[in-house]
């Protein structure tokens, strides 16, 4: 891929002159409390306006959870702790015995959101305060809550405890979500303090846990820039990231806020060369509302997103210290080739993509939008191992993530400038390509591999013959559509044949993304838990451990899951056939 001249011209205007002062300002502004978040929004808006970029500010009321102080004490010792957002507070303290349940620290982001590798020992945690290694993440919290614990102390792996949020509920809860809101107290402690508490637990001690958490509805500004395209303005690429943070949050996510500011400034300057529109949004409520800002936007602009959004592009933690590589980059399979070309052309690096985690601000899967990026660049695995770092969820793998040490030294000016250019080229390329640059044949190849994995343990109990046939039929149609798209690519973007082809590609995403990333219905939000590929069929992996009785229910489940997949595949094939007619 050779960059188009208009993209090359835009990249030449990228600099740190406008965005770096925003990072410096955010080093003086904690962005947890809604008052400080409003101040941060005002800073972003003022800088956009200073560069002549028009910006609209929505102010929804979001349901947020604001952690305060916490401590764990015995008769002679006291340990500092950080309460997790959405946990049950104990402002007057709760006293109970400790129960230590050993666990292995997460090796990657997916493991962080599960209960993790908890000891299989039958340890009675009822009426006790559980102590276990790891982060206070939703899967583990829900596991101990179900077993009757009063509270949980998460022993973090480093010398700093990490802030976070412990609910599986994605965004502001609806009535179906509310029962999943955590019902136990959850705090995090550092590894040294956790080690001391583990010894107390082994000695049969009890502790008093005190925690403060304030919950409620808070006005939360959502700045949105719309840069209209010249040829097909109703269609748009959505670039977005959060501007609230834990503490000063420079690596997570002041650098992302600065990147979006610069992309907005440059695209506005080059708007005459933008074929389709670009929207750029800054979210509140990411940290204290489990992506409440992006979820609000997905809810309130759902139909516009459903009908017109080409792709959503998340911007979180670019340009961090030592983050030289583009490995473990979140993207959907249909975007792999396009993103690889952009990164190769702009950064002279090779891309190693991975399946997006059910995390970040990926609040658009249930609408069915092709997506790429979340955490972009990161440090080499060898460098991380040399430093002795453990897995975290941002900051380019720097372990200052979600701590008071996520300060300006985490940002790297040269890497940030490079990453800004990658984001700009990717967004502008997706908006300007005559035919949307997504290869769904790669998605289908992923489906085939997933079905192979799921069918192996079934030992003939059930086969995915119907799904494989539908995949092959759609793949053949996609090959023909590829020939058609090459012809359409020579036409103007506004030509009705081009529009029809791009509508078909968007419809492909609306059909295939949900069956691959969601269990819930359209326009609702799945829990913040790891979602396996083709999740309706993933239960097949447990077939060999099931009784003959339960395998009958499994067969029924797989039939229904396959029906959902086959219907989506056939609808996608018919969509393409109509587009080529």
Image (spheres, rainbow, N blue to C red):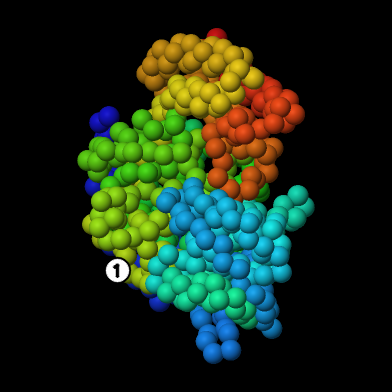
Q: Residue at horizontal 57%, vertical 52%?
A: 120
Relative placement, left or right, of 162 versus 364 is: left
Query: Residue 175, position in %: x, y?
Result: 77, 52
Query: Residue 385, position in %: x, y?
Result: 29, 55
Does residue 426 sit above or below 60 in this rendering? above
**Viewer-side residue, 443 vs 502:** 443
Does residue 467 sit above or below 453 in this rendering? above
Query: Residue 218, position in %: x, y?
Result: 65, 68
| Residue farthest toward the front in the current orientation of the protein | 203
Q: Is residue 32 visible?
A: no
| Residue farthest toward the bottom in the current orientation of the protein | 76
Residue bearing mark 1: 409
**Viewer-side residue, 528 vs 142:** 142
Query: Residue 117, position in %: x, y?
Result: 52, 52
Q: Residues within 10 Å of mark 1 (few under 14, many from 20)?
A: few
**Viewer-side residue, 31 vs 97:** 97
Q: Residue at horizontal 71%, vertical 62%?
A: 148
Relative placement, left or right, of 21 versus 135 is: left
Q: Is residue 551 visible?
A: yes
Element on which disc 1 rests: helix
Q: Residue at horizontal 60%, vertical 30%?
A: 544
User: The C terminus appears in which quarter of the rendering?
Assistant: top right
Q: Quadrant of residue 438?
A: top left
Q: Quadrant of residue 458?
A: top right
Does residue 360 sit above or below 561 in this rendering? below
Q: Quadrant of residue 16?
A: bottom left
User: The N terminus appears in which quarter of the rendering?
Assistant: top left
Q: Residue at horizontal 30%, vertical 61%?
A: 388
The number of discs equals 1
């Amino acid at each position: 891929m050779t960059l188009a001249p208009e993209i090359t011209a835009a990249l030449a205007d990228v600099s740190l002159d406008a965005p770096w002062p925003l990072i410096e300002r955010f080093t003086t502004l904690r962005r947890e409390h809604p008052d400080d978040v409003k101040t941060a929004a005002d800073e972003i808006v003022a800088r956009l306006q200073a560069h002549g970029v028009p910006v609209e500010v929505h102010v929804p009321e979001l349901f947020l959870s604001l952690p305060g102080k916490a401590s764990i004490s015995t008769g002679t010792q006291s340990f500092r702790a950080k309460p997790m957002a959405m946990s049950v507070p104990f402002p007057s303290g709760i006293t109970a015995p400790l129960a230590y349940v050993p666990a292995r620290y997460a090796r990657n982001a997916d493991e962080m959101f599960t209960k993790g590798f908890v000891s299989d020992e039958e340890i009675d945690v009822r009426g006790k305060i559980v102590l276990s290694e790891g982060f206070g993440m939703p899967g583990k919290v829900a596991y101990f809550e179900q077993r009757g614990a009063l509270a949980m102390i998460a022993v973090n792996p480093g010398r700093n405890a990490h802030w976070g949020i412990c609910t599986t509920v994605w965004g502001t809860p609806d009535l179906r979500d509310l029962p999943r809101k955590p019902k136990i107290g959850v705090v995090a402690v550092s590894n040294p303090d956790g080690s001391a508490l583990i010894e107390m637990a082994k000695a049969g001690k009890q502790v008093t846990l005190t925690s403060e958490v304030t919950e409620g509805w808070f006005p939360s500004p959502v700045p949105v820039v719309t840069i209209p395209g010249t040829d097909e303005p109703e269609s748009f690429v959505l670039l977005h990231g959060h501007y609230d943070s834990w503490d000063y949050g420079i690596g997570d996510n002041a650098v992302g806020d600065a990147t979006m500011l610069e992309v907005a400034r440059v695209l506005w300057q080059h708007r005459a060369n933008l074929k389709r529109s670009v929207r750029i949004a800054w979210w509140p409520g990411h940290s204290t509302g489990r992506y409440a800002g992006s979820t609000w936007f997905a809810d309130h602009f759902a139909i516009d997103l459903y009908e017109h959004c080409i792709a959503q592009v998340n911007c979180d933690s670019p340009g961090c210290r030592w983050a030289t590589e583009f490995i473990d980059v979140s993207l959907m399979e249909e975007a792999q080739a396009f993103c690889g070309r952009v990164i190769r052309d702009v950064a002279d690096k090779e891309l190693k993509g991975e399946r997006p985690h059910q995390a970040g601000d990926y609040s658009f899967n249930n609408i069915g939008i092709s997506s790429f990026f979340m955490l972009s660049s990161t440090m080499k695995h060898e460098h991380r191992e040399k430093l002795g770092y453990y897995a975290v969820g941002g900051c380019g793998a720097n372990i200052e993530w979600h701590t008071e040490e996520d300060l300006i030294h985490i940002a790297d000016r040269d890497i940030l400038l490079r990453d800004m250019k990658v984001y700009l080229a990717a967004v502008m390329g997706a908006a300007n390509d005559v035919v949307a640059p997504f290869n769904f044949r790669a998605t289908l190849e992923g489906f085939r591999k997933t079905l192979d994995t799921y069918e192996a343990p079934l030992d003939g109990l059930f086969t995915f013959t119907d799904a494989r046939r539908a995949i092959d039929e759609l793949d053949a149609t996609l090959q023909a559509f590829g020939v058609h798209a090459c012809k359409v690519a020579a036409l103007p973007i506004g030509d009705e044949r081009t529009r029809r082809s791009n509508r078909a590609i968007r419809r492909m995403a609306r059909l295939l993304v949900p069956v691959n990333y969601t269990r819930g219905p359209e326009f609702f939000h799945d829990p913040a838990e790891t979602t396996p590929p083709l999740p309706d069929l993933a239960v097949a992996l447990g077939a060999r451990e099931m009784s003959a009785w339960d395998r009958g229910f499994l067969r029924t489940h797989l039939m229904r899951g396959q029906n959902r997949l086959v219907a989506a595949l056939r609808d996608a094939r018919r969509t393409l056939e109509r587009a080529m007619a």
